[in-house]
Image: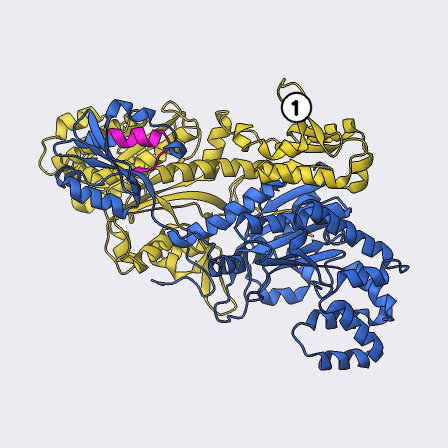
Chain colours: A blue, B yellow
Amino acid sequence: MSSAALPGFRDFYPAELAERAHLMRAWGAVARRYGFVEYDGPPLEPLDLYTRKSGEEIVGQLYNFLDKGGREVALRPEMTPTFARMVGARANALRKPVRWFSTPQLFRYERQQKGRLREHFQLNVDIVGETDVLADAELLAVAIDVMRELGLTADDVRARVSDRRLLTALLGAIGVEEAQLPVVFAAVDKMEREPRESIAARLTAAGLSAATVDRLYVLVQGTDWIAVRAEYGAHAGVAEHVARLDRYLDALDAMGLREWVRIDLSIVRGLAYYTGIVFELFDARGEFRAICGGGRYDALLAALGPVDLPALGFGMGDVVLGELLRARGLMPQWEPALDWWVVAGEGVPVAAVLRAARALREQGFSAEYVLNAEKLTTQKTGAQLKTAQKAGARRALVLRDAMTAEVRAFRSDEPPREIRLDELHQLGAPHLA
Amino acid sequence: MSSAALPGFRDFYPAELAERAHLMRAWGAVARRYGFVEYDGPPLEPLDLYTRKSGEEIVGQLYNFLDKGGREVALRPEMTPTFARMVGARANALRKPVRWFSTPQLFRYERQQKGRLREHFQLNVDIVGETDVLADAELLAVAIDVMRELGLTADDVRARVSDRRLLTALLGAIGVEEAQLPVVFAAVDKMEREPRESIAARLTAAGLSAATVDRLYVLVQGTDWIAVRAEYGAHAGVAEHVARLDRYLDALDAMGLREWVRIDLSIVRGLAYYTGIVFELFDARGEFRAICGGGRYDALLAALGPVDLPALGFGMGDVVLGELLRARGLMPQWEPALDWWVVAGEGVPVAAVLRAARALREQGFSAEYVLNAEKLTTQKTGAQLKTAQKAGARRALVLRDAMTAEVRAFRSDEPPREIRLDELHQLGAPHLA
């Protein structure tokens, strides 16, 4: 038998599952707090759902195949096309703005690099039907509050924000012509990874003057928002975009999240996709890839389907986020845990143990006992207590006879106490015990 | 764009997602109460993981393909092979008995029948490393307690239990020879769906006497456990199996679950797979397919991998269970729900609304407001309250100015009351509000 998962796929043993569940819980709790409701779609979709959005070249990265009915299908590499399909199919009936979230597992056949995964889980949060910048601020607030929910602070994580419309206007103001925009956007996207000389050479070749290249670098590298506002805040064609981003920052300030945010015009993201404010979350030390990315994609729903509605959203994967939490000591360590272990004292029958376990479980406690009648009735109390401790039990209920038991706590200095078995149903809810 | 999911695949809009979440919550809560811990594996696995267990003929029912690395892969049609692989890889390090559960989505390319799905979610609960019948009783108890957790009673659902070893011994006692066993088991499996005449003809052709066929029908159809015990309880070769099943029933009795259980020797399940006690859960009116099935498979781990450990488990899908709950009026109806809607009274600035929403969310409440600055500051209070009600808000916080607000409840006759905004952070946790 194959003794391993496919390369790039993860087995989630209980300890890893617990880490995933920790992220999932935070994702769901924060999204719900902002009024988002959960949805999901199929992990297998028609292939054209993805080629329609991303072109044929995406097929090289997909798990795609012909199913037994002759349909071209693919494992979902992202959630947005499914989201667009589902919203499109019921657009008229849905309350606007639509506020939905999902936590799908996604699949990409990436050429295997060391440690690179071919599946991950991703929080998707989207808003449909609102053009105002308050929606953009709300969206970023969700992403940042997930960080806070997981124990990260503004010292750990930075939100870098740009606006496609503002950058386009600024480029016009510094003398970039419309025909040069694609080259300049591509250059901006590479500024962090490529030396200035080679980028400048390409820009000059495209017709930009040396002075314009200088001004571009001042604008984009380590953007100084105060300086940009001072210089362009009243500039015709730029002013409205500066004002919009100011309203965005004011909203995040009112939400107490301003300190997490930097305006950074070097953030580009997918050119064919985003139409307005875009953002990425990074760890402040720059050790990891982006934690999260998203923005406004007002044209996509109309391009993909029957409805023309403005939209914005982000995706946040479990892999980089998990690495960051572990690196910062914020990932809870999984340990076996159990509320109760029921121990059969000498001469106590199996049925008494089962009744006691049931009484505990009925109240919502987790409970175990030795799952073998012979061992249960012959093992010494000490041996059973050792098993209980190994299982991570917080307390043992040591049955003395059919009527009474002793409660022993393992992880506190709570003294042993007697309890009558007919009082077991009054122990109360687990969180009070 | 494809405007629909693939045939046999479901879109989970918020209402359907909420139903799925209702089942998932019950599954996890009950499994944890019995000390089971959650795991998961990849939804895509090497094809041979399935053919090794089920033979080449399973390939016809799989979503299988060649991946871009030339590997034969398949979407998982069941969880047991992944479970066996994972347990096998760490068998020595795991505390025994292993008690694990999972809630995977599974995929089968079934020839499309009306309403027949090609994916479903399935609770898998398994125990590894214990041969005693107490483990069998514990396993069935988990399945029954899921029913109870969802509001079903012993009047709604019946657990039908058989034991491969007992039936084999009984067949010997009534004169079936070992070579005839396969034919007889196959006949037993069909008794519910095929007329007695045609089955009897096959059995007679296989060499069974008419008297043996009669005795077989008495044993298997509407099994009378009291009569079986009286007749075979002391029969050499049968007695030990009767005694074991009695201990099983006694254990379920001590757990308060005896009334759910019927011994029914017509339950066969997969012949190549199960080795001991097997069970299925059915709705008592017989309107639906089986809710759940499982049993002991002591030989499977050794057949599939490096470890030889006894094991038992069950699978419970979300589809039949959901149908049953809806038919019995036990599936909660999803409605949009929100703790708070923040309303901007006349002249109240956007920032005050954002601060109030944040204060509510910080305490764990869900909160929304009109996500458009112009509408938020110009819409009348009445219009915003209407939006709040449509969103399912329980309460509105109507800001009067930067200092005070009025609390209005929508779903109770709680009178409107004033609140100072600097007291918002003292509202307390949602479940106390």
Front residue of A59 and A176:
A176
Above or below residue B148? Residue B59 is below
Q: Whole-percent x and y of residue B52?
A: 34, 59
| B31, above or below A196, in the image | above
* Furthest-right residue in this view: A236
Whole-percent x, y for residue A323 in the image: 49, 60
Residue located at (75% from left, 44% from top):
A130
Query: x, y percentage for residue B293?
Result: 35, 39
Question: Looking at the rendering, in which quadrant would you find the C terminus of chain B?
Answer: top right
In-image side of A187 versus A115 (left or right)? right
Q: Residue at x 57, y 45 (%)?
A: A40
Residue B60 on the magenta segment: no
Q: Image height check: is B27 above or below A187?
A: above
Query: Viewed as shown, does residue B147 lie left or right of B110?
Result: left
Classify residue A213 as left or right of residue B267: right
* Quadrant of the rendered image containing residue B50: bottom left
Q: Residue at x 27, y 51 (%)?
A: B95
Task: Examine the rendering and report whether any part of residue B3 can be seen.
Answer: no
Residue A316 visible in the current orientation? yes
Between B232 and B354, the residue placed more toward the observer is B354
Q: Which class describes the residues within 10 Å of circle 1: few (<14), some (14-19), or many (20+)?
A: some
Mark 1 belongs to chain:
B
Residue B221 vs residue A218, the one in the foreground: A218
**Numbered range of the magenta stretch:** A355-367
Q: Amino acid at mark 1?
A: Phe
Name the magenta segment's main secondary structure: helix
The residue identified by callout 1 is B410
